[in-house]
Image: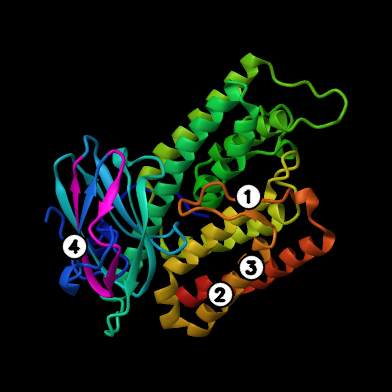
Amino acid sequence: MITARLPKPAAVAAACGILFVTACTPNASAGTAAGGTGELSVTSTAEDCSVSAATAESGPLTFTITNSGDQVTEFYLLAEDGLRIVSEVENIGPGISRDLVVNATPGSYYTVCKPGMVGDGVGRAAFTVTDSGTAVEPTGDEQAQIDAALTNYKAYVKDQVDQLLTGTEDFAAAYVAGNDDEARRLYPTTRMHFERVEPVAESFGDLDPKLDNREADLAEGEEWTGWHRIEKDLWPPAEAGYVPLTQAEREAVAAQLVEDTTTLHSSIQGIELSLDQLANGAIGLMDEVANGKVTGEEEIWSGTDLWDFQGNVEGARVLADGLRDLLEARDPELAATLDADFTSLSTELDKHRTSAPDAAQRDIAYVSYGDLASEDVKALSDRVNALSEPLSRITAALLG
């Protein structure tokens, strides 16, 4: 389980949030980076995140970010999944410029700015790194790579909880206003942010049950709050005797959900993590899938279990991918097995999508869990079990 600890000074490589590090120098659209130099300019405003080029060659890249807005901003380079943070620079004040230096491997990425340092950001755009012909290897010793992996995961958690908070505020507002169709639309996609980082929420004592307790989880006399209390009201059961919440009750449970999510948002700002916690977090997320999502017990009224399933799988993959360079050095066969098993599980889950996500991972949709045939559930369960075994070996491979 991931636990909260007091912050400590990070190594220089980690402090800049860089996965492959060549330098760390703060304050310093269509086309390719000029002259193949790997130097790109970024302009961040309240509405946009304009990058001077959409492609660059692999190797050292320098993004010079200028904040032309009136709020403190952040800049992210995201991996192909649009979730994992490859590198980021934060706390760029209005009128200030800072550099982000990344030793980038060939592949597909996204760039995005986050004015106000909350929400899902603005100006998200595809960014491609082509092969320069020169091998790009992780730099620094093993400890520097560990520090970078930990820092990047903390940045990912912060980003997901930022989006969880803004999404929860929108969801609660729709629910209180009686706009139930909009609330039902926002419910599963907002919860995905929580599901991706669930081990972190579980580390803060009673905060996780306040947010995520199912009715079946309640102890005698325990007050029921959180997502599933509202879920039952939005998808009321056909059982006789169910009484919908009054307007005052709606306002109270919605306010409590926002308050508890705000507390989670504040709490994660100072978390410190260790290598084993990252590895065990990936295992824990797949346990969540096996014990709740694949059984259909998580979202018994809404039937939105597959959204939760996807969130847990994405969170586990972000953790595993963040440790990939370390794992390849220790156990390349295990790294290859994990890649194959994650792909197989994702392919199986994709069979039940009714719409694909956009670049910001919004508006993804699946069939209701109740519409799955028994053979569909078995196929998903088999793929979960196949992935869980190699995941269970990550911690030993990295620490042994």
- For label 2, count other residues whose C-alpha is less than 10 Å away and answer few (under 14), some (14-19) or many (20+): many
Q: Nearer the viewer, mark 4 or mark 3?
A: 3
Q: Which residue is mark 2?
A: 338
Q: Which residue is mark 1?
A: 365
**Amino acid type of the residue that numbered disc 4 sits on in the rendered structure:** Cys
- For label 4, count other residues whose C-alpha is less than 10 Å away and answer few (under 14), some (14-19) or many (20+): some
Q: Which mark is residue 347?
A: 3
Q: Does dot 1 land on a helix, a strand or a loop?
A: strand
Q: Does dot 4 land on a helix, a strand or a loop?
A: loop
Does the rendering let one see residue 287? yes
In the rendered structure, are the residues bearing label 4 and label 2 in contact, judged by CB atoms less than 8 Å apart? no
First-in-chain label (1 vs 3): 3
In the rendered structure, are the residues bearing label 4 and label 3 in contact, judged by CB atoms less than 8 Å apart? no
Q: Nearer the viewer, mark 2 or mark 1?
A: 1
- Colour basis: rainbow
Q: CA distance from mark 4 to mark 2?
A: 31 Å
Q: Nearer the viewer, mark 1 or mark 4?
A: 1
Task: Out of 382 and 371, give the one closest to the viewer.
Answer: 371
In the rendered structure, are the residues bearing label 1 and label 3 in contact, judged by CB atoms less than 8 Å apart? no
Residue at x 26% of width, y 65% of height: 31
**Amino acid type of the residue that numbered disc 2 sits on in the rendered structure:** Leu
Percent position of residue 195, x then y: 56, 49
In the rendered structure, are the residues bearing label 1 and label 4 in contact, judged by CB atoms less than 8 Å apart? no
Q: CA distance from mark 1 to mark 4?
A: 40 Å
Which SS does the magenta portion mostly show?
A: strand
First-in-chain label (4 vs 2): 4
First-in-chain label (3 vs 2): 2
Q: Which residues are magenta?
A: 46-68
Q: Which residue is mark 4?
A: 24
Q: Is residue 362 left or right of residue 141?
A: right
**Amino acid type of the residue that numbered disc 3 sits on in the rendered structure:** Thr
Percent position of residue 85, x then y: 38, 59
